Image: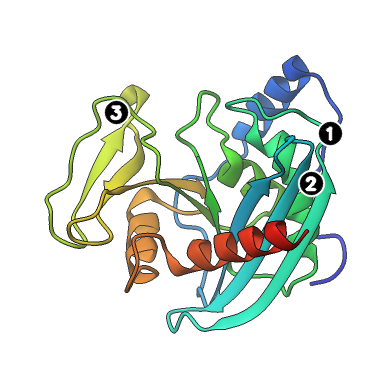
Amino acid sequence: MKNSITTVSHSWRVSVDQAKQIQQKLSERVVAKDDFNRIERIAGVGVVFSRKQDEVLVGCVSLSFPQLEIEEMAFRKQKVNFPYIPGLFAFSAGPAILSAIKKMQRPDLIMFPGRGIAHPRGLGLASHLGVLLDLPTIACSRTPLWRDYPEPSPENGSHVFVKGKGKKLIGAVVRTREGKQPLFVTPGHRISVQTAVKIVLQCSPEYRMPEPLRQAHMLARKMAQSA
């Protein structure tokens, strides 16, 4: 899909307070349950900032699912107009990510680094762009998202669900490779925690990181080194 890809839009040139207000409003649109048909194409997003933090480099890689064969790649280098602030990552990288995704055929699901609904305002990067694109999205983080998180058992595929306020499921700690540190998985939009975990495991046959994210991160790093 190589035209307008968002179903909801907002200004990216905003203040910190305005950004938080946008997050609060968009969080009301998040669907935290399975809302899709077949998943046959999964895209991963990789994000690298320049040393001066004034440019963002985004790699997007689309893979067939469940075969995990690379079908398409896209790259975008763009000036950052909103400083990196924890909790507001989408306002720094979001415009470049959307530009990169626009170059590709529309995927059935997108994996993002960082957070989904496990976010102070319920709208991490995966949820934010999931709502704008109206696509199922998943967030995976190598960095713990919760203090004193439950540790899954050592074997590959083990996982422990994490609950937030009101005992609502907001994510999971997932062991994608035996003997390796777990990943922290949160649904973004139009997908349940349980299905997000299942897909992450299906996309991690050899490495700790799901293949769409691993390939996208490698592309972003490669392009950053040659930029």
Relative image position of residue 136 (x, y in whole percent): 55, 57
The tag earlier along the polypeptide, 1 or 3, is: 1
Q: Residue at x 76, y 54 (%)?
A: 98
Relative image position of residue 8 (x, y in whole percent): 78, 45
Q: Amino acid at mark 3?
A: Lys
Q: Which residue is mark 3?
A: 167
Q: In the shown orientation, is residue 122 left or right of residue 186? A: right
Q: Is residue 169 visible?
A: yes
| Proximity of marks 1 and 2: CB atoms separated by less than 8 Å | yes
Image quarter (top left, top right, bottom left or bottom right) of the C terminus: bottom right
Closer to us: 129 or 131: 129
Relative image position of residue 159 (x, y in whole percent): 22, 51
Residue 9 picture quarter: top right
How far separated are the C-alphas under marks 2 and 3?
Answer: 34 Å
Q: Residue at x 28, y 36 (%)?
A: 162
Q: Which residue is mark 2?
A: 95
Q: Which residue is mark 1?
A: 81
Q: Amino acid at mark 2?
A: Pro
The residue tagged with tag 2: helix, strand or loop? helix
Q: Residue at x 40, y 60 (%)?
A: 209
Q: Nearer the viewer, mark 1 or mark 2?
A: 1
Q: Residue at x 36, y 36 (%)?
A: 144
